[in-house]
Image (tube, rainbow, N blue to C red):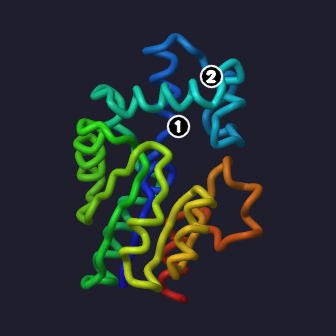
């Protein structure tokens, strides 16, 4: 069995650190708390910025050693990784993340995942990059967990089982996917399907 996980919003919490980075490094205060943001482009947190500006700030933070390697784990992620290792000792565990192409981004992502006990392979794609090529390299029937619906669509095309990890940003898509609100939900799907 193979398990493939997105990182931001699934294993690690990106938005709290990004909100902190924006305020401390850029002097831009979020209009709403990160946990209320309903849009992947963060248009409610930063209504005076366009999507390209937000993308540029994300790129900057993803290279910043005071922020990017210090993302906190998503609630339950550490325990879930341990359970997966115990329940599926022969499973291949991988992370596929679109965080940026700078060498320091890769190094910091690996460092951050090691802190939460992640022991699998890690692929870091360019920010916003398509995951199809890497997902197609895994055997059909692998489990893929992501918080971005378009990535789940690509995984389905590759023949994988998919789980949408619930966030405020993807609530409008819950009817279209198998949804996990917690890591325990993910573990239940793995065990019953």
Q: CA distance from mark 2 to mark 1?
A: 11 Å
Q: What's the residue at 53%, 79% (across, down)?
A: 161
The residue wearing badge 1 is 15
Residue 107 bears which disc, if any? Answer: none
Residue 30 bears which disc, if any? Answer: 2
Q: How many marks?
A: 2
Q: Are marks 2 and 1 in contact (CB under 8 Å)?
A: no
Across and down, in percent, residue 154 comes to: 56, 68
Q: What's the residue at 73%, 61% (across, down)?
A: 173
User: In the rendered view, would you say 184 is above or below 44?
Assistant: below
Q: Is residue 72 left or right of residue 43?
A: left
Q: Is residue 141 left or right of residue 164?
A: left
Q: Find the residue positioned furthest to the bottom.
A: 193
Circle 1 sits in a helix, a strand or a loop, which is it? helix
**Are there few (<14), some (14-19), or many (20+) residues within 10 Å of tag 2?**
some
Q: What's the residue at 41%, 59% (across, down)?
A: 77
Q: Is residue 54 left or right of residue 93?
A: right
Circle 2 sits in a helix, a strand or a loop, which is it? loop
* Quarter of the view holding residue 17: top left
**Are there few (<14), some (14-19), or many (20+) residues within 10 Å of tag 1?**
some
Q: Find the residue positioned furthest to the front.
A: 133
């Amino acid at each position: 069995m193979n398990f493939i996980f997105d990182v931001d919003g699934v294993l690690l919490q990106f938005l709290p650190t990004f909100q902190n980075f924006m305020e401390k490094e850029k002097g831009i205060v979020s209009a709403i708390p990160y946990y209320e943001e309903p849009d992947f482009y963060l248009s409610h947190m930063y209504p005076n910025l366009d999507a390209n500006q937000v993308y540029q700030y994300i790129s900057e933070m993803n290279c910043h050693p005071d922020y990017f390697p210090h993302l906190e784990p998503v609630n339950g992620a550490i325990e879930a990784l341990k359970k997966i290792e115990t329940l599926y000792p022969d499973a291949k565990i991988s992370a596929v993340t679109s965080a940026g192409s700078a060498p320091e981004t890769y190094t910091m992502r690996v460092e951050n995942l090691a802190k939460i006990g992640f022991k699998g392979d890690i692929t870091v794609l360019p920010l916003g990059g398509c995951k199809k090529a890497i997902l197609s390299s895994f055997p059909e029937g692998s489990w893929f967990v992501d918080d971005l619906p378009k990535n789940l669509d690509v995984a389905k095309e590759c023949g994988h089982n998919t789980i949408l990890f619930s966030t405020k940003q993807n609530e409008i898509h819950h009817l279209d996917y198998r949804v996990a609100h917690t890591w325990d939900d993910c573990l239940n799907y793995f065990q019953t399907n």
